[in-house]
Image (cartoon, helix red, strand yellow):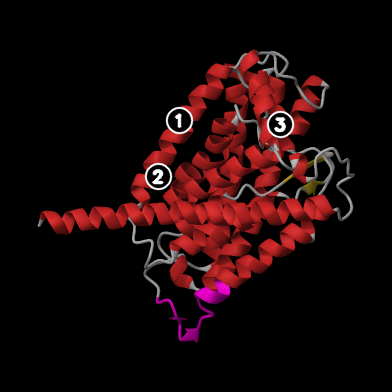
Amino acid sequence: MHMADALISPVVGGTMWLAATSTMAYALKKLKDEDIFESKKIPLMGVAGAFVFAAQMINFTIPGTGSSGHLGGGLLLAALLGPYAGFLVISVVLTIQALFFADGGLLALGCNIFNMGFVSCFLAYPLLYKTITAHRYTKKTILAGSLTAAIVGLVMGAACVVIETLCSGISELTFGMFSALMLPIHLAIGVVEGFVTSAVLIFIYTAQPSLLDRTMDSETQDGVRKFGFRNVFIGFVLATAICSTVLASYASSNPDGLEWSVMKTTGHEMLSSKDAIGETAARVQQSTSVMPGYDFKNTKTSGAVAGGGTVVAGLVGSTLVLLLAGAVGCIAALLQRNRNKKALHNK
């Protein structure tokens, strides 16, 4: 559901950039109030972000539609890291995708962060997932919470895309038809995301329940010895490597839900930007994207077989996300440390 620049106007794009960056600043401010050292949140931010980046490269076919979908990841990150760290990490993922892999437009980056990050982390997670799992963390409540929040979050994000194109005056995308295509297809994608999210969270719950429920003991639950944080970390690393090097090479070549909806509505696979700001953003993105489309520049691949470009893009992108997301956590930790020092000095 990565929006291209041609789908929005500069006014909408600029407004959503302001909304996204303001929310990022607020999330960083709130994150420094959390005990990110004790909760081992910094390494988790890096490795979970890398996993989401790799998982987003795997498009799965939606049967009977000619469309495909991929994991959004915002809900998973919020459930594991909390809404503030989760939002910052998904913002890092989307920014790296836009800058280095031309996945989603630069002008539309604020929209993508809002649609895939804010909606999941600050609406679907607290209102649905957290409410359903509030009384007792069990595998059943994790599954129910993940499915409900993922489906509603994806549909809400798709609705935001429709509203943003409407406000941008994109006349080719008629509101009624575009909505009728976008919402059902993302409901189907949400079902898959819900099951994938619940599977990952149930693994974490089994391995280290305290990462999801702070009231639980980190080592034991119901007298059963748990695997520990190290195995959770290693599990994410292995899953990231498998997604990047194996599964991504066999991703569906069908257009994703947004591209499919645009094509069905307009009859064209892509729309072209009609304003100078959009064209400038496209030129900037062309210069920054070292591997557009997750492949080497000037190469054409079918996307159905293992290609060196896909593997390299997955590994490079995952590493960049791991480092930058971890760096965001370190910045929050430094801000927290400086605040504590000032508080002690003022006593």
Left or right: 340, with 251 as reference point: left
Q: For the residue marked with disc 1, what is the amino acid?
A: Ala
Local secondary structure at mark 3:
helix
Q: Is residue 308 visible?
A: yes
Image quadrant where residue 110 sits: top right
Residue that badge 3 annotates: 286
In the image, residue 140 above or below residue 292 = below
Return the x and y of residue 35 as percentages of the image width and height: 34, 61
Return the x and y of residue 229 as percentages of the image width and height: 50, 74
Foreground residue among 57 and 151:
57
Residue 27: numbered disc:
2
Q: Residue at x 55, y 56 (%)?
A: 323
Magenta part of the chain: 217-232
Residue 35: numbered disc:
none
Return the x and y of residue 248 as percentages of the image width and height: 77, 54
Local secondary structure at mark 1:
helix
Q: Badge 1 local density, few (<14 within 10 Å), some, or many (20+)?
A: some
Q: Is residue 131 visible?
A: no
Quadrant of the rendering where the N terminus is positioned:
top right
Select label 1 or label 3 by which is in front.
Answer: 3
Residue that badge 1 annotates: 19
The CA distance from mark 2 to mark 3 is: 30 Å
In the rendered structure, which disc, 1 or 2, sits on the residue that comes first in sequence?
1
Foreground residue among 134 and 26:
26
Q: Badge 3 local density, few (<14 within 10 Å), some, or many (20+)?
A: some
The CA distance from mark 1 to mark 3 is: 25 Å
